[in-house]
Structure formats: structure tokens, C-alpha cells
Amino acid sequence: MLVVTLCAQTSLNALYNEFAGELNASTVNLNGLAMMMGKPFLEKHSDSKISDIRVLSLDECTKEVKDRFNEQALRFMDKRYELFVSSNEPDEKVRIFLKFQDNMIREMVIITMGDTPELVLLKGKIKPSDIENLGNGGK
């Protein structure tokens, strides 16, 4: 039974890697030099720092690919991440997962499922209060 449960779970890397190679999938990876070059343009509202952004968009993929992603994304389970927000609208589902280390958010995973499925991974040092402020309209 445990083996069946483990096989039914989907990790972040497995989900990203499986769909990044699909026909018409779009990927964007910003890290290192790209993030350093953008630093002067980023607002300085806090001590939070994003060091890496990975985006996977399946908007231009076939319905079959989107459906397969949606199904696997629903089974996303990676013990390193905590579920922060879950939203189930009739035409779209959103899950936001956080990975904490030393009282800072080190990674944020945003998965949207529906007609325009996407996976976004942010890495860095994000203060939890900055995430709370987003929920309060940036106040």
C-alpha cells in the first residue's frame, strides 16, 4: 500500500522535468547573472531577496498535455514544502507551497491548474511578513 501511495505522489522536479520538454511548453529560468542585472530595478521594500525564478507555462500545449499536467499537479506532494494556499474555482485550481529554513521562506512554488496550467518556482530569502503583506493588499 505504501509503495502505491509513494508512486501516486509527484515531486517538484519530476513535475517540472516531465512537462518542460513537451511540444509548445514555455520555460523561463532567471538566476545568477540575470537576477543580479535586474537588482537595480527591483523595489527595496524589504530585506527579501529572490535569487532564482523558474517558470513553466503549458498555455500553448494540447489539451491532452494540459489534462495530464493538471492530474499530476493535483497529486503534487513533496515533503520539503508546506501547503500555504489552496483555491478551487470551477475553472482553475491554485496551490501555493512554501519551504522554510531559518525562519525564512527559501522557496515558493505556485501551481495553477486549468486551461492555462503553470508552475512557478521562486528561490531566495523571503520574509514571511512580506507574504502576509501581499494578502493584505501590500499594506
Image: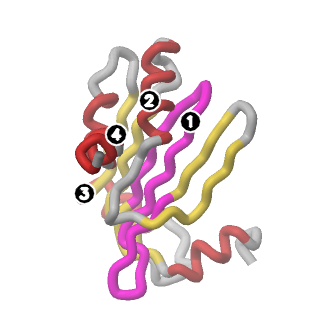
* CA distance for labels 2 and 4: 14 Å
Bounds of the magenta segment: 97-122
Residue 117 x %, y %: 53, 32
> How packed is label 1: few (under 14 Cα within 10 Å), some, or many (20 or more)?
many
Quarter the C terminus occupies: bottom right
Q: Quadrant of residue 10?
A: top left
Residue 88 x %, y %: 69, 44
Q: Which residue is mark 2?
A: 69
Q: Reading the chain from its start, which is encountered first: label 2 or label 1? A: 2
Q: In this rendered view, identify the residue nearer to me: 51 or 118.
A: 118
Q: Reading the chain from its start, which is encountered first: label 4 or label 3? A: 4
Q: Are marks 2 and 1 in contact (CB under 8 Å)?
A: yes
User: Looking at the picture, does residue 38 appear above or below residue 24?
Assistant: below
* In this rendering, the label closer to the viewer, 2 or 3: 2
Three-letter code for the amino acid on which mark 1 is drawn: Met
Q: Is residue 100 magenta?
A: yes
Three-letter code for the amino acid on which mark 3 is drawn: Leu
> How packed is label 2: few (under 14 Cα within 10 Å), some, or many (20 or more)?
many
Q: Reading the chain from its start, which is encountered first: label 2 or label 4? A: 4
* CA distance for labels 2 and 1: 8 Å
Mark drawn on residue 113: 1
Q: Kindly state the secondary structure of the residue where label 3 is placed.
A: helix
Three-letter code for the amino acid on which mark 4 is drawn: Ala
> In this figure, what is the number of numbered marks?
4
User: Looking at the picture, does residue 56 appear above or below residue 116?
Assistant: below
User: Looking at the picture, does residue 104 appear above or below residue 40?
Assistant: below
Q: Which residue is mark 3?
A: 33
